[in-house]
Structures are given as structure tokens and as C-alpha cells.
């Protein structure tokens, strides 16, 4: 495997941190042992955690007002993979990349797969894009794609999704994520039921093109760009469509795609109960689809999501394996740093959820002893598992402190000189 950051530099960084990490790890291990928990079991669990990086996340994002490009942004999918490889090398928690087409369309899929392989990366779910028009495209998506009233527009959107499946097959992916911005901006603009009927008809054609071992993930989002009525606005619609389509169709929960204060962990519990939880796009938000770093606003919510996942895993057994992906946009931070930060925060919630004393929680719930039940969750959430995460990384060849190690590597300066900005071009990121 090619290492993008000099392995000697990582080793030197870890050597400097070793004494402090060891002391913290021993102290935490002692504290956990007094609670009846084995730190080594938790460190092994942390080492098995993986979350996919979104290819579009390594570019600088933007808002509808402006995009302020960052230095050394990747200009093509190969450079995106280089940045993703740095994230994985230092965190050891992001071995796969979720590509977005046509942004990442390769001229030679085998070459792209080989490039990823050499970097120690694989491809996770592929994403279609019918929320933008592409140069030379025959039919516009201005009034919708999979739900368009114009049959030729729908056929074009279906064909794009089928092309995504074919590209994904060549890249070794096993799932297609479909998010559409289709909807209406005015009451009366669209027949609400008719739009969903057209969506289902289009999705049936896409579903029929799925290989046997593939899934399609339906991603819902409350609003934007349709501000009055988004066709796939909520998990209920997503669930109904996934059920109508069949067993290969599942629901994808993007944490930022709900109204403020929505109980997302309950959505997770419901989808898991009915066998339709396909996966996640992790991020955080304060207002809407803010795409902020995971755990940066509401880490307790992230923990509660993982608490439900831990409960579901116990009930369902090893077959329960929703796809974990990040979906973020970075406007003011270095995307590599933000994605490393998020991967670690999601991994933190995963480990904290494993700390919950489930037998005690079940007893407290059965006897309606409310306050200690709430405290049982808080005890786990308040436990600082940083030393476990750092130890898992160091043992796997990653960095004790990924952001500090990344900064000392000078990677951003190096790529800034290798990747001069294209004047006027929005080479990556969303906008
Ligand atoms: C959407 C949604 C999708 C992502 C696009 C770029 O809001 O979250 O997952 O493909 O943004
Ligand atoms: Mn998303
Ligand atoms: Mn989104």
C-alpha cells in the first residue's frame, strides 16, 4: 500500500505522544475495570470501526452565496483519492470512499479502481446526481428528474442511475444512493401524489437494474432545493417507497435532513425494527442541511443514534450492518482535517454506545426507574474514550493525534504547489 504521508513522520509523532497516551490509557483502563469493562475489548472494537468518506467532502464546500476555494483543492477524482488516503492513513477509520457521479466519472473505471487499491482504499455506495444539469444534457432537471412530468426527462434520469450502477460495479461498489431534490416551490405547482407515483415508476426501472448482491438506498431530505413540498421529504415516505420497491431497497438517514428537534434516534430504531435501515450520512447541523462536522453541535444525539444501533445489533445479530458514510461540506476548515475530525467523532459515539450497561438499563426500564435509566446512558456518554481511540489508531499504524500529525506533515502546502487553482473554476465541493 502506498502511504501518502511519510510513515517515519507518523512514527515520530506517535513516539512523542507515547508516554502520555500510555498513562491516559492505563488510567482509563483502571476506571473501566472498576465498572466491569475490559479496555482491550473496547480498543479492539474501535479498531474494527469504519466509516466511508464522501469524495465530494475533500473539496471546499460553499453556500448559495459564495464559495471560497481552499488551497490545494483536488482537481480530479485521483487527487480526491489522495486526500482520502491521508484521512485513512492517519485515522485508520476510513478505508472506503463514496463516489458521486458524474462529478467523479472515470474515463477508465479499472484504472481508478487500481489507483484506489494501491492507496489501500475501496469504494462504498455510489451516488447519482440528477439535481444539476450537466453540460450537453438533453433534458433539464429544472422541474424534476425521477418525478418529472416529461417522460423523456424521467428516462434520462433513470439512465443516469443505471450508468451509476454500472460504474459502481466496475469499481467494486455494492450500493447506489439516490437523493433527488425533486419537489415543488409553490402549492399547486405539482400534484403531490402524482409526483410520488412517477418517482416509484422511475425507481422500479432503477431497481430492476440492480445486481443480485446490491442495495439501493433512498435518502430523504426535508427541504431544499424544493421549498414547499419535497417528494422524498421524510423517513415515512422513504420507508413506504423502499417497501414498495422490494428487499434490495433500504432507507438512508442523513442526520442533517430533518427538522430541528426531530428525534432521529427514534427514526433509526423504527427503520432497524422493520429491516429497512440501509445506512447513514453522518454530519451535524443546527438549522437545516448544514453539513457541519459530525458531533460538532450535538454529540449527545450522535451517541443516542449509536445507542440504538448497538441495541439493534444485539437483537438482529451480524446480519445487521448499515452502511456508515460521512456527508459534509467544509466552508471554513481544511476538509482533510474536518473529515478526520468527524471520522473520530463518529467512532467515539460507536465506542461510547458499547459502554452502556444494557442489562442494568433493561432492568431500570422494566421497573420504570426513570432517572437512573437516563443516568445509565449519561454515564456512557460522559466517559472520555479518547485514549481508546488513539490507542486503536496507533496500533493500526495511524496517528495518535491525526490533525496535529497532518499539520506537521506539510501535506496541504505540498498539494497547494502541485495543484494550482484553476481560475474561475469550481473544481470540487458543492456549488
Ligand atoms: C444532498 C444530500 C446528498 C448529497 C448531496 C451533495 O443534500 O445530502 O447525499 O449527495 O447533498
Ligand atoms: Mn447526504
Ligand atoms: Mn444533505
Image (cartoon, rainbow, N blue to C red):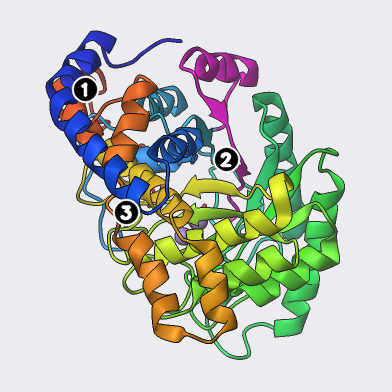
Q: Residues within 10 Å of mark 2 (few under 14, many from 20)?
A: some
Q: Report the residue at 37% width, 60% height from top.
A: 380
Q: Nearer the viewer, mark 3 or mark 2?
A: 3
Residue 429 position (above or below residue 204): above
Q: Report the residue at 32% width, 53% height from top.
A: 293
Circle 2 sits in a helix, a strand or a loop, which is it? loop
- Give the alpha-carbon distance from disc 3 to disc 1, as whole Å: 21 Å
| Nearer to me, 6 or 204 | 6
Circle 1 sits in a helix, a strand or a loop, which is it? helix
Q: Earlier in the sequence, mark 1 or mark 2?
A: 2
Q: Quadrant of residue 83?
A: top left
Give the percent coordinates (x, y) of residue 314. 65, 55
| Nearer to me, 172 or 182 | 172
Q: Earlier in the sequence, mark 3 or mark 2?
A: 2
- Name the residue tied to disc 2: 101
Left or right: 277 in relation to 8: right
- Name the residue tied to disc 1: 411
Q: Earlier in the sequence, mark 3 or mark 1?
A: 3
Q: Residues within 10 Å of mark 1 (few under 14, many from 20)?
A: some
Q: Which residues are magenta?
A: 105-130
Can see residue 143? no
Q: Is 211 a magenta residue?
A: no
- Name the residue tied to disc 3: 293
Give the percent coordinates (x, y) of residue 156. 73, 51
Can see residue 325? yes
Give the percent coordinates (x, y) of residue 340. 32, 39
Circle 3 sits in a helix, a strand or a loop, which is it? loop
Amino acid at each position: 500500500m502506498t502511504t501518502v504521508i511519510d510513515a517515519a513522520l507518523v512514527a515520530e509523532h506517535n513516539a512523542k505522544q507515547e508516554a502520555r497516551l500510555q498513562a491516559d490509557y492505563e488510567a482509563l483502563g483502571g476506571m473501566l475495570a472498576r465498572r466491569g469493562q475490559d479496555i482491550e475489548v473496547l480498543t479492539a472494537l474501535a479498531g474494527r470501526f469504519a466509516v466511508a468518506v464522501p469524495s465530494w467532502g475533500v473539496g471546499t464546500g460553499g453556500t448559495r452565496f459564495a464559495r471560497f476555494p481552499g488551497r490545494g483543492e483536488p482537481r480530479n477524482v485521483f487527487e480526491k483519492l489522495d486526500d482520502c488516503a491521508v484521512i485513512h492513513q492517519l485515522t485508520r477509520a476510513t478505508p472506503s470512499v463514496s463516489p458521486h457521479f458524474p462529478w467523479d466519472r472515470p474515463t477508465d473505471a479499472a484504472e481508478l479502481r487500481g489507483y484506489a487499491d494501491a492507496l489501500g482504499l475501496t469504494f462504498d455506495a455510489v451516488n447519482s446526481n440528477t439535481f444539476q444539469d450537466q453540460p450537453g444534457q438533453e433534458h433539464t432537471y429544472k422541474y424534476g428528474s425521477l418525478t418529472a412530468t416529461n417522460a423523456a426527462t424521467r428516462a434520462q434520469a433513470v439512465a443516469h442511475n443505471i450508468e451509476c450502477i454500472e460504474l459502481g460495479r466496475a469499481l467494486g461498489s455494492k450500493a447506489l444512493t439516490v437523493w433527488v431534490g425533486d419537489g415543488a416551490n409553490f402549492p399547486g405547482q405539482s400534484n403531490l401524489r402524482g409526483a410520488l407515483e412517477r418517482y416509484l415508476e422511475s425507481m422500479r426501472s432503477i431497481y430492476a437494474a440492480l445486481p443480485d448482491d446490491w442495495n439501493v438506498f433512498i435518502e430523504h431530505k426535508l427541504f431544499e432545493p424544493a421549498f414547499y413540498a419535497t417528494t422524498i421529504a421524510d423517513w415515512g415516505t422513504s420507508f413506504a417507497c423502499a417497501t414498495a420497491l422490494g428487499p434490495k431497497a433500504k432507507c438512508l438517514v442523513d442526520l442533517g435532513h430533518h427538522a430541528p428537534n426531530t428525534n432521529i434516534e427514534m427514526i433509526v430504531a423504527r427503520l432497524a425494527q422493520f429491516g429497512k435501515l440501509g445506512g447513514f450520512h453522518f454530519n451535524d447541523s443546527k438549522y437545516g442541511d448544514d453539513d457541519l462536522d459530525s458531533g460538532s453541535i450535538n454529540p449527545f444525539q450522535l451517541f443516542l443514534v449509536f445507542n440504538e444501533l448497538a441495541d439493534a445489533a444485539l437483537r438482529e445479530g451480524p446480519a445487521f450492518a448499515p452502511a456508515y458514510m460521512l456527508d459534509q461540506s467544509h466552508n471554513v476548515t481544511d476538509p482533510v482535517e474536518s473529515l478526520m475530525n468527524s471520522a473520530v467523532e463518529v467512532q467515539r459515539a460507536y465506542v461510547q454506545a458499547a459502554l452502556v450497561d444494557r442489562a442494568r438499563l433493561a432492568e431500570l426500564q422494566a421497573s420504570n426507574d426513570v432517572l437512573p435509566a437516563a443516568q445509565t446512558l449519561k454515564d456512557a456518554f460522559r466517559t472520555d474514550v479518547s485514549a481508546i481511540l488513539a490507542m486503536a489508531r496507533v496500533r493500526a499504524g495511524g496517528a495518535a493525534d491525526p490533525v496535529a500529525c497532518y499539520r506537521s506533515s506539510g501535506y496541504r502546502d505540498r498539494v497547494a504547489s502541485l495543484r494550482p487553482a484553476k481560475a474561475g473554476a469550481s473544481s470540487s465541493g458543492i456549488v
